[in-house]
């Protein structure tokens, strides 16, 4: 006889567990402690007898238990084992709860580190985790919807920081693609957000490009007086000669520099293009490195932190030095020295565009062509950096500036 709410409430515990049947395999298991547990007995398509737990009474009412029974029977009719499905759903729920956006993002960055991604890039990606922690950090990554991602990055756009909004969105997309590849998510919600943010305006690093003003800048740097070791001044003095990215100079190590050969080899893991970059040193650059070696050559870093020699100067040290000299962020940046070199070297007409691009470590999209040009322009690059060093010295001393003729040597 099918169960009723009244008959269920009248059931009393016994010394041993016993069953009370309802209908179509549904029954209650009454325990000696007084528990009343819903169970469903069924057979799979292969004939194996199995049991499915449906919860306890009264949390699961008679009607709810029958609904679950009927749902399980429909699954059986479709060839699905309801007990196996429940087990898999339970595992999926546990995986989902454990794999929050933050935990997956951390795993993604750990992979970046194994892949040898530049240290500065790793630092920036960890910054994005902190930036998104409050809005997305604790959410299971498989549950995050497009509207949540948009809500997380929209405040940056509202603050007129389009660059931060777009980069944050790109980071979220990268984390989701990693999650999909590792079976932690089924889709990337950022794909549905294309065009949602305001169109990003190209960001150019501020730079002084007029030769006379470059001379003024160089003279100002020579007069820089900072606190502690003169590493900031010397970093700013060196940057125009080598025109590498500030982060590459900031983390320069003595093991990379061969003063006898006048060569600086920056390892691939510190380069944006993930390729080793070999920098020929002009006599001016080599002289600065020698002076630095007398001060910091017994340590790892060319520019050690004032606080500890185990770390290099901070990423913002050089920009802070320029601000201290009175140059605003809209006037000159540490990264702007690359634009200075690119502009004036090209305008000189003395050097091939390919040699200048190689000197700037711009990656060639054609891998075969890029491999050829790395070697083909070495002699020209050596001559170019020495000419560039001499030219900067002439600007520093305020020599008469002769207009460039538009030609370049082969």
Image (cartoon, helix red, strand yellow):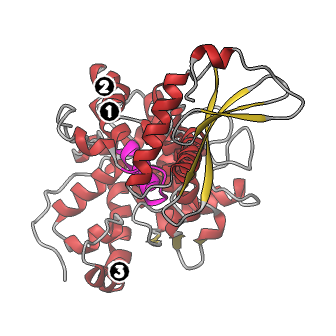
Instruction: Say if residue 364 shows up in the picture.
Output: yes
Whole-percent x, y for residue 318 in the image: 49, 40
Residue 245 shows up from this direction: no
Asked whether, in this view, residue 391 is left or right of residue 302, the answer is left
Residue beneath the point at 71% across and 60% down: 297
Q: CA distance from mark 2 to mark 3?
A: 42 Å
The residue to which callout 2 is attached is 154
Query: Bounds of the magenta span?
Result: 170-186
Q: Residue 91: where, in percent of width, then height?
A: 59, 48
Badge 1 density bin: few <14, some 14–19, many ≥20, Cα 10 Å: many
Q: Earlier in the sequence, mark 2 or mark 3?
A: 2
User: Distance from label 2 to label 1 (Cα)?
Assistant: 7 Å
First along the sequence among labels 2 and 1: 2
Which quarter of the image is occupied by the N terminus? top right
Q: Which comes before the other along the chain, label 3 or label 1?
A: 1
Residue 45 versus residue 206 in the image, above or below: below
Instruction: Pick whichever, 55 or 249, lies toward us.
Output: 55
**In magenta segment, residue 181:** yes
């Amino acid at each position: 006889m099918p169960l009723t709410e009244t008959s269920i409430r009248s059931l009393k515990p016994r010394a041993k567990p016993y069953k009370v049947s309802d209908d179509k395999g549904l029954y209650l298991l009454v325990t000696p402690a007084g528990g009343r547990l819903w169970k469903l007995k069924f057979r799979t398509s292969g004939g194996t007898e199995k049991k499915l737990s449906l919860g306890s009474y009264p949390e699961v009412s008679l009607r709810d238990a029958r609904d679950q029974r009927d749902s399980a029977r429909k699954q059986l009719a479709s060839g699905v084992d309801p007990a196996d499905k429940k087990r898999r759903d339970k595992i999926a729920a546990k995986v989902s709860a454990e794999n929050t956006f933050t935990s997956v993002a951390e795993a993604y960055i750990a992979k970046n580190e194994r892949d040898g991604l530049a240290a500065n890039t790793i630092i920036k990606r960890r910054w994005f985790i902190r930036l998104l922690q409050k809005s997305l950090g604790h959410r299971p990554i498989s549950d995050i919807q497009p509207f949540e991602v948009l809500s997380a990055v929209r405040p940056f756009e509202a603050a007129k920081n389009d660059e931060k909004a777009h980069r944050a969105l790109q980071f979220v997309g990268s984390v989701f693609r990693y999650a999909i590849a590792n079976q932690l998510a089924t889709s990337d919600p950022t794909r549905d957000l294309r065009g949602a943010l305001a169109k990003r305006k190209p960001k150019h690093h501020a730079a002084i490009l007029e030769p006379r003003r470059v001379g003024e800048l160089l003279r100002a740097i020579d007069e820089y007086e900072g606190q502690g070791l003169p590493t900031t001044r010397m970093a700013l003095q060196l940057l125009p000669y080598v025109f590498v990215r500030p982060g590459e100079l900031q983390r320069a190590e003595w093991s990379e520099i061969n003063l006898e050969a006048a060569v600086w080899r920056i390892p691939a893991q510190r380069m944006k293009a993930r390729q080793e970059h070999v920098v020929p040193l002009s006599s001016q650059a080599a002289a600065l490195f020698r002076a630095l070696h007398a001060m910091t050559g017994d340590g790892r870093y060319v520019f050690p932190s004032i606080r500890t020699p185990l770390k290099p100067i901070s990423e913002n040290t050089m920009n802070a030095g320029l601000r201290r000299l009175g140059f605003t962020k809209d006037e000159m940046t540490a990264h702007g020295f690359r634009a200075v070199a690119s502009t004036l070297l090209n305008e000189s007409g003395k050097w091939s565009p390919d040699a200048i691009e190689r000197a700037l470590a711009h990656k060639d999209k054609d891998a075969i062509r890029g491999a050829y040009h790395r070697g083909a322009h070495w002699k020209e690059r050596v001559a170019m950096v020495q000419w560039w060093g001499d030219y900067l010295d002439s600007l520093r001393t305020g020599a008469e500036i002769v207009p460039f003729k538009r030609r370049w040597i082969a």
